Amino acid sequence: MNTVLITGCSSGFGLDIAKFFLDKGWSVVATMRTPRDGLLPVCDRLRVLPLDVTDAGSIRDAIEKAGPIDVLVNNAGIGWLNALEGTSMATAREIFETNTIGTMAMIQAVLPQFRARRAGVIVNVSSTVTLRPLHLLSVYTASKAAVNAFTESLALELEPFNIRARIVLPGRSPETQFGANAQGRVKDAGGYPEPYAQIVQDVFARWAEAPAGLVTSSAAVANAVWRAATDPACPMRLPAGADAEALMAGHQ
């Protein structure tokens, strides 16, 4: 039986990815900072473990408790929507520590077992914001663009060991709490700088006017992660969601 370890399973994409792999008959190690009962169905193929991807000790403990795995899905991440002038360097470091360094640290922790078995798959969940410049997303986009470049180079390093690395790029997903959490984080940090008020207003207006069907569902992301994990012919960058697919098609 194949085993997948997924980070950031408390809600949104991570939660649905975990459910998807369970439905496919896999053994699932679902990790989150603070495990909660009732999020996932009771199943003898499921383990829920605490994990903070910014804490080396937490990573070490989770990997030890998980045991051998076949696929690592790096989904844990935090959002941010603000101008650079409204972003403290402490916040920028927090975003990179979670989205970028956390991804690297998780991969580094599982590589010895993958390399020893000469088998394993790494799926990094990035974002389509990396495909075009967007207002108020400079810092967040930088953290995810770094993941893209890192993954593509990493794949070359790991190819001789029969280890695959792939990127899944979701679009905007209003059904999840990711965007709301990012906005809440901005509010807690003092909000948007006044000189950027018009830009902020325009950004939210464009979102409100976006076609209702041209968004990304958690189900689409789960399907894309499944393909990246199980299809050796999957492309390096795989869009997830109607808006992501449209954007990727225009980007090529």
Image: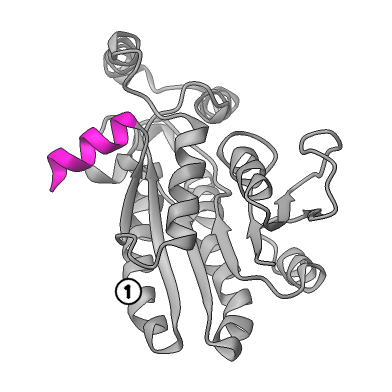
- Looking at the rendering, in which quadrant would you find the N terminus? bottom right
Q: Label 1: how many residues lie within 10 Å, few (<14), some (14-19) or many (20+)?
A: few
Question: Looking at the picture, does residue 55 appear above or below residue 247?
Answer: below
Q: What stretch is highlighted in magenta?
A: 242-252
User: Which of the 4 image quarters holds residue 19?
Assistant: top right
118, 54: nearer the viewer: 118
In the rendered structure, the answer to whether residue 27 lies left or right of residue 43 reads left
Q: Is residue 244 magenta?
A: yes
Q: Main secondary structure of the magenta part?
A: helix
Residue at 76% across, 64% down: 58
Question: Looking at the picture, does residue 241 appear above or below residue 118?
Answer: above
Question: Colour scheme used in the picture?
Answer: one colour
Residue type at the position of mark 1: Ser
Q: Name the residue under label 1.
A: 153
In the rendered structure, the answer to whether residue 197 lies left or right of residue 231 reads left
Q: Is residue 133 magenta?
A: no
Q: Position of residue 170 (x, y in %)?
A: 39, 40
Q: Is any part of residue 88 visible from this angle?
A: no
Q: Is any part of residue 86 visible from this angle?
A: yes
Q: Position of residue 64 (x, y in %)?
A: 79, 74
Q: Position of residue 128 (x, y in %)?
A: 32, 41
Question: Looking at the picture, does residue 173 appear above or below residue 43?
Answer: above
